[in-house]
Image: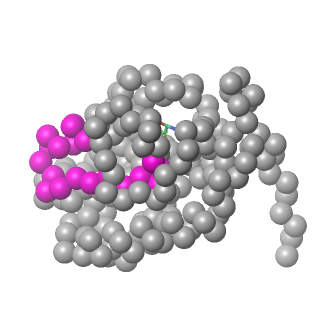
Amino acid sequence: MAQKTENMMEKDIQEVLFSEEQLQEIVERIGRQISEDYRDKKLLMVSILKGSVVFMADLMRAITIPCRIDFMAVSSYGSGTKTSGVVKIIKDLDIPLEGYDLLLVEDILDSGMTLSYIMEILQSRGPRSIRICTLFDKPERRQAEVDATYVGTQVPDAFIVGYGLDYDEKYRNLPYVGVLKPQVYGG
Ligand code: IMP
Ligand code: MG
C-alpha cells in the first residue's frame, strides 16, 4: 500500500483529543440509539453547516432506519474563537417541517446561543418534535438554555479543530480532533 503523505496541518495541533477510531465508536453508539428512538417516527436530520458535515455524513450512515436530511447555515462566529452573539440565517431549510421529527445535528454545543436561536425559529414551523444531537459539548460555557438529547462526549474548554470543526475555515478536513496551538490564533 502507498505510504500516507505527511499531514501539513499536524504542526498546528498541540494534542490529539479523539482519534479517527474513537470518533467512529462515538458515532456508531449514537447512531444505534437514534435508530432505536426514531423507529416509529418520521426522522428529518438537519445538519447545521458547516461544522457538522463530517459528523452528519458518518452519523447518517450509522442510522439504520429511513431518514431524510436537510441543511441550514447560520453565522455566529466570524473568524474568531469567541461567540459574537449575532446569529443570522444564511441558508434556510428546503423541506417544510410539519409532521417531521427533527433532529438538529451540531458539531459542538458551546454557549448554546446558535442552537437556542435555531430551535426557536424551527419550533414555530410546527414540526412534531425537535431534539438536538451534538458530537461535542462544552457544558461549562453555556449561556443559553439548551440541552442536547444525544451527546457524543463532553470536551474541556479548549479550542478544538478537525472532523468538521474549524479555525478561520481551516482544519475541517483533519480526520481526528485536536487542540489547536494557542499561538495559531494569537492566544
Ligand atoms: P455556540 O452558539 O456558542 O454554542 O456556538 C457553537 C458553534 O461555535 C459551533 O457550531 C462551532 O462552529 C463553534 N465552536 C465553538 N467551540 C468551538 C471549538 O472549540 N472549535 C471550533 N468551533 C467551535
Ligand atoms: Mg458550527
**Magenta run includes residue 155:** no
Residue at point 42% right, 30% down? 75
Q: Quadrant of residue 116?
A: top left
| Res 63 visible | no
The answer to which of 13 and 94 lies nearer the viewer is 13
Question: In this picture, which residue range is highlighted in magenta?
Answer: 119-137
> In x, y percent, where is residue 47?
39, 50
Q: How many marks?
A: 0
Name the side, left or right, on which 59 lies relative to 11: left
> In x, y percent, where is residue 64?
37, 77
Residue at point 49% right, 66% down? 27
Quadrant of the image for the N terminus? bottom right
Residue at point 26% right, 64% down? 43
| Res 178 visible | yes
- The image's colouring method is one colour
**Magenta run includes residue 132:** yes
Quadrant of the image for the C terminus? top right
Residue placed furthest toward the right: 3
> In x, y percent, where is residue 71?
37, 48
Name the side, left or right, on which 80 lies relative to 128: right
Name the side, left or right, on which 53 lies relative to 23: left
- Relative vertical location of residue 134 with respect to residue 86 in this rendering, above or below: below
Q: Quadrant of residue 22?
A: bottom right
